[in-house]
Image: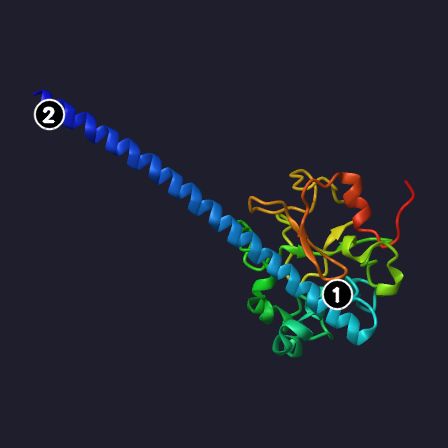
Amino acid sequence: MMKHRWLAVGCVALVVALTVTGLHLVSEISHNRHAVQSCTCHGHLKSIATAMLHYHERYGHFPPAYLVDKHGKPAHSWRVLLLEYLDPGTYGAYRFDEPWDGPNNRKLEDKMLSCYACPADTKRGRWETNYFVIVGPNTVFPGSNTVKVDDITRPHAETILVVEAVDQGIHWMEPRDLELDRMSFAVNDAKKPSISCRHNRPPGVAAVDGTVFSLTNIRGEQLRQMVLIVEAAK
């Protein structure tokens, strides 16, 4: 009887030990998965920033946030313009003589590049993007107007070019992004559009010089200054 009791106690201890070990392994696997997703996300930002710099090298300025139609309405996104470098075949098939969601362009939805989506955002819609520019005056992307590197007087390594965000519901071809005067400068703000992510590290951004980094310990006012091309008066 005593032998059976000790055997039962031993089995319970073994189960507890295996459970603790299992939980530790699950936690470790989850941590590693998030780390890989964050690194992949940074790689996507790097690809986009590199394409932006190639565009600047060819045209003498960064792409506009969007091209407008004859009525002045946003018609084509910078994400489409970068296809010239990221996916020339799809770029050649895109029709600039119709809106981004025109009948021919809609056929290209499934051509969405992996570098336009963060792997950690499993809640996004099928064709929704996670990478945006910030549109507004005194930013790198003042709407349909363009900016040159020489226009930027702030340190290029600290001036934001491209950001990641979740829950924006924006189609990858849609000429819409984060707006300077409507967004929050609190990272991961759940109430307003903001620079945000779903991985367990701070969201990443790409700077004008092509470097990519996470927004670690960045205050709201500091972040606001980082999206401007000329230092704003404080």
Q: Residue at x 79, y 66 (%)?
A: 62
Location of residue 36 with respect to 181 vertically, above or below = below
Q: Quadrant of the C terminus?
A: top right
The one nearer the camera, 98 or 186, is 186
Q: Residue at x 78, y 52 (%)?
A: 158
Q: Residues within 10 Å of mark 2 (few under 14, many from 20)?
A: few
Q: Residue at x 83, y 51 (%)?
A: 228
| x, y percent for residue 165 | 65, 50
Q: Residue at x 57, y 69 (%)?
A: 111
The answer, for residue 227, to whether it is visible in the render is yes
- Amino acid type at circle 2 is His
The answer, for residue 99, to whether it is visible in the render is no
| x, y percent for residue 89 | 61, 78
Horizontal side of 103 relative to 16 (left or right) equals right
Horizontal side of 155 relative to 48 (left or right) equals right
Q: Write down the residue under mark 2.
A: 4
Location of residue 193 with respect to 140 vertically, above or below = above
Q: Write down the residue under mark 1.
A: 75
- Amino acid type at circle 1 is Ala
Horizontal side of 138 relative to 39 (left or right) equals right
Q: Residue furthest right?
A: 233
Q: Residues within 10 Å of mark 1 (few under 14, many from 20)?
A: many
| x, y percent for residue 222 | 79, 42
Quick one: label 1 or label 2, which is nearer the N terminus?
2
| Quadrant hosting residue 24 | top left
Q: Give the mark toward the camera: 1 or 2.
A: 2
SS label for mark 1: strand
| Quadrant hosting residue 1 | top left
